[in-house]
Image: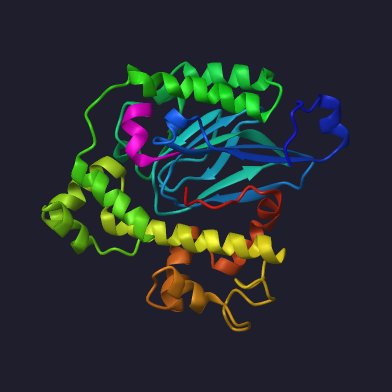
Amino acid sequence: MTVDKPVSTLDQQVSTVDEHCRRRPAERLRRYVAWYTGYRQRGVPPGLHRGLPSPFLTLIFTLDEPLMMLAHPDPRQPPGEFGALLGGLHTAPALIAHGGAQSGIQVALRPLGARALLGLPAGELAEIDVPADAVLGAACAELRYRAVAAAGWPERFAILDEILLRPAAGTRVGPLVAPEVGWAWERLLDSGGTVRAADLAAGTGWSGRHLASRFRAEIGLTPKAAARVIRFTRARSLLVRQAVAGQHPAAGLNGSAARLDGSVGRYGLADLAAACGYFDQAHLARDFRALAGCPPSQWITEEFRNIQAGAWLSEEG
């Protein structure tokens, strides 16, 4: 649900608000940013949300309440609150809490665009979360001030376009991404994470060790770890599509009622594993537990409210 009028304090007190709106950025930003997601919830049950590994860096600007991080991908980072958060690629889930109200804008940043927008390679943010103003400076406060006063999500996204276009226009010019690294990353995305690291190395003309070192420094993960995250993201996207189509957290991929553990139904986890390049269903289940911190059936059940609201859409953009 998307509205073009800000929710008043009175409205927040007497009604439930559950808004989610996703939009692609301005054309000139699309090589750096996949999409924006605006969200506002009021009067919903308090809950926990898993921030899962994906092929995008995470940039979140809150509008009202701070972001409550109970656990980061790196367990050495203590819990804390963030007005704006920037996180790199990671291979473990984060845990986010809300007390029944939350609002903000999440930006999916492409790793190859980090130098242009952030002035540093995505590798410097691998597995960690940092206050976004430590990297973006006063732009965070400006965005929040203007976004809170904006009439609705289209206006907020336009403000974000304007602010992010400043560094993209050249104020953060730095070293270019090595073509070999860019080629390997795009091959991984195009293949859905199924291309082998050895084949990527052969394609670049580098040794496997050299590619892994350069790739990790730029992207934040090795090619093998990145492939794992990309496969996982594709599998998760298919689970989301089935939930939207079936309107039940245990709907099968064909829209029929089926258990996500694959024990019932014509199209279960075994078929999903084959479609996403896993060796078998057990391989998919192990990876999902490692990257999400829970099995697929538990995750889809926990997130079904967000799926119904449109918060989880395809992450293949």
Q: Is residue 284 visible?
A: yes
Q: Position of residue 4 (x, y in %)?
A: 74, 29
Colour approach in the figure: rainbow
**Secondary structure, magenta segment, majority class:** helix
Name the residue: 47% across, 45% down.
72
Above-or-below relation of 121 to 76: above
Identity of the residue furthest to the right in this view: 14
Check if residue 139 falls in the magenta segment.
no
Please indicate whether residue 67 sits to the left or right of residue 216 in the image: right
Toward which corner of the image does residue 177 lie, by quadrant? top left
Q: Position of residue 281 (x, y in %)?
A: 46, 77
Name the residue: 29% across, 35% down.
121
Please indicate whether residue 224 sits to the left or right of residue 249 in the image: left
Identity of the residue furthest to the front in this view: 27
Q: Quadrant of the N terminus?
A: top right
Q: Is residue 291 visible?
A: no
Above-or-below relation of 314 to 179: below
Q: Position of residue 56 (x, y in %)?
A: 43, 44
Q: Which residues are magenta?
A: 108-117
Q: Nearer the viewer, residue 313 or 120?
A: 313
Name the residue: 11% across, 55% down.
207
Toward which corner of the image does residue 96 lie, by quadrant? top right
Above-or-below relation of 216 to 120: below
Q: Nearer the viewer, residue 302 or 152?
A: 152
Please indicate whether residue 228 sits to the left or right of residue 67 in the image: left
Q: Nearer the viewer, residue 208 or 154?
A: 154
Check if residue 112 falls in the magenta segment.
yes
Toward which corner of the image does residue 142 lie, by quadrant? top right
Above-or-below relation of 200 to 132: below
